[in-house]
Amino acid sequence: MKFFIDTADVGEIRELADTGLLDGVTTNPSLVAKSGRDFFEVLEEICALVPGPVSAEVTGTDSQTMIAEGRALAKLATNITVKVPLTVDGLKACKVLTAEGTMVNVTLCFSAAQALLAAKAGATFISPFIGRLDDLSQDGLGLIADIVQIYAAYPQIETEVLVASVRHPLHVVEAAKMGAHVATLPPAVLKAMFKHPLTDKGLDAFLKDWEKTGQSILDRAGKGKGANAA
Ligand code: E4P
């Protein structure tokens, strides 16, 4: 499963890119507004930090404006993925931009029927928003299961399922069990995935016991015995 990070905060992206675990980034107009920064500048910085797909959302509502905005965004960097909403115009724009060789992420997907249409329009990614469905007492992960099953039934579909609106690590684990290709994670969720209290407790005990031995791996390696250095 690929991990994208769902933020327009360049500082957080830099910190998490350092882990070597980031495969891409998603932004949306709300996240850009939250950053308080110039959209194009932010995108250029993100694209330089993360080599994988970086989603940048159009804000026009008719297909011609979306196509023009998509072309302008795609010029910024080769890893820009143009994000369009799942509307009739959004899918028209998706078809045109995809035919031009631009990666397209179709966003705001809330049903399997919509996901089928996005695949037919040639989307690179479909983004079902599972947390927002859960908020309405609907089954977000059930939607992922449906889309993964439907796409798998048609090997010619190349659209990747990008699990969005993720709220906690269990969302990621369950979506991974279903075979979803990508999850886009708020930074706090990615950080939470590293954590387990037994890891902290176990490490603490190992380090205390090691200290009692009075040994140092690096000192020992430097002394030559068992070290690679001649
Ligand atoms: C995905 O691309 C969206 O930006 C995001 O996952 C939306 O999540 P939210 O429901 O937490 O706003």
Image (spheres, helix red, strand yellow):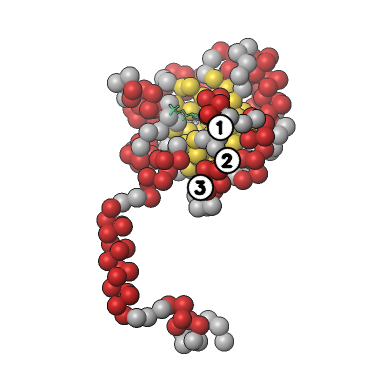
Q: Provide the secondary structure element on which disc 2 rests.
A: helix
Extreme-front residue of the structure: 36
CA distance separating discs 2 and 3: 10 Å
Give the residue number, with chain letter if any, for mark 1.
Answer: 35
Determine crowd level at label 1: few under 14, some 14-19, many 20+ residues with C-alpha closer than 10 A. Answer: some
Residue type highlighted by circle 3: Leu
Callout in the foreground (3, 1): 1
Name the residue at 29% across, 70% down: 208
- When asked about the image quadrant of residue 190, the answer is top left
The percent coordinates of residue 121 (x first, y second) are 57, 22
Q: Provide the secondary structure element on which disc 1 rests.
A: helix
Determine crowd level at label 3: few under 14, some 14-19, many 20+ residues with C-alpha closer than 10 A. Answer: some
The N terminus lies in quadrant: top left
- For residue 74, above or below residue 217: above
- For residue 125, above or below residue 229: above
The percent coordinates of residue 150 (x first, y second) are 42, 27
Give the residue number, with chain letter if any, for mark 3.
Answer: 16
Q: Are marks 2 and 1 in contact (CB under 8 Å)?
A: yes
Name the residue at 63% across, 16% down: 60
Is residue 199 or residue 3 the one in the foreground? Answer: 199
Residue type highlighted by circle 2: Val
- For residue 50, above or below residue 102: below
Is residue 161 or residue 216 the one in the foreground? Answer: 216
Name the disc covering residue 10, or none.
Answer: 2
Q: Does the image show residue 102?
A: no
> Along the polypeptide, which appears first: circle 2 or circle 1?
2
The percent coordinates of residue 217 (x first, y second) are 43, 77
Tag count: 3
Name the residue at 65% across, 30% down: 38
Q: Provide the secondary structure element on which disc 3 rests.
A: helix
